[in-house]
Image (cartoon, coloured by chain):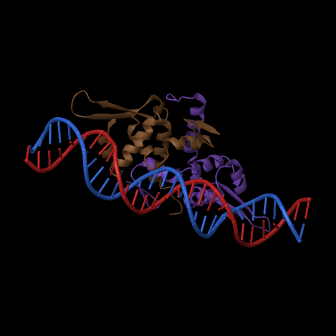
Chain colours: A purple, B brown, C blue, D red
Amino acid sequence: MYKFKGKEYPCCASLTMGLIGGKWKTVILFHLRNDTLRYNELRKEMPTVTERTLSLQLKTLEEDGIIKRKVYTSKPPLKVEYSLTDFGKTLIPVVQSIADWGHKTVHNNLDVSG
Amino acid sequence: MYKFKGKEYPCCASLTMGLIGGKWKTVILFHLRNDTLRYNELRKEMPTVTERTLSLQLKTLEEDGIIKRKVYTSKPPLKVEYSLTDFGKTLIPVVQSIADWGHKTVHNNLDVSG
DNA sequence: GCAATAACGGTCAAATAGGATAGTATAAAA
DNA sequence: TTTTATACTATCCTATTTGACCGTTATTGC
């Protein structure tokens, strides 16, 4: 049994998936792996996600300590930047290997059965 | 846009997650990464999954060409063995990095915020 | 004055995932 | 002869995730 942040997981792999699983989290982390991006910049990178879902996922990633949210409110134009925390940066190799596999698989077309 | 087996994904990372995402798939792949296991051997490794869910996940992993199912029915005692296909073996580094991160994270207790 | 941009939040609904429980067929073991 | 083991399948139900759509506050640009 693995425990992390009050949640229990039966396997080390399921712990990781509990944090980065779901339809959009790895996509967000992929776009943030080398960059700091604003909310609307993320939206442009991920046009098919709804705003509601994006902000929900950003919130849980922040709660889990994986990304940080920096608000520039020193005066008017609201500006919010998202980036990986130090803890979140430890996930870069994982996210990268997930992304690389997807990329390589499409290109090699290793798909046998059609 | 990435396409694989008739499904579309907005990002290379989401393609991978479409195949190995969900609560149990990486756990199954983790246990099969070096071994061939029978249905009930998998159950013993994953006592908290229900039989329904386990067999559903095994079926979709098989349909996606990631694992193969070998039935030994040459006479009576029914025996079914699950193992990775060659295609599935290309996922070993991905699954391993997911598992390693979970393992290391629990042990280092990198959890900052509590 | 009006539209556009930025960064969301709220509500509702649909889809999907997963769990609880029980049942099946066969055969061996006690 | 009853129980146990193997490898599932079938129903039913709940919980979680995600999408559609609209509203909000504030400010800049035309």
Residue drawn at x 58%, y 52% is A88
User: How many tags in the picture?
Assistant: 0
Name the side, left or right, on which A45 lies relative to B38.
right
Q: Residue A97, position in %: x, y?
A: 56, 39
Please name the residue shown 69% across and 52% down the image.
Answer: A42
Residue D5 vs residue A32, the one in the foreground: D5
x, y percentage for residue B74?
25, 27
Q: Residue at x 53, y 60 (%)?
A: B112
Viewed as shown, does residue B29 lie left or right of A53? left
Left or right: C18 as drawn, with respect to A106? left
- Indicate the quadrant where residue B5 lies: top right
Residue B72 shows in this picture: yes
Quick check: D22 above or below A110?
A: below
Instruction: Residue A75: give x, y in percent of width and height.
Output: 79, 68
Q: Residue at x 45, y 50 (%)?
A: B23
Residue B35 visible to an observer of this rendering: no
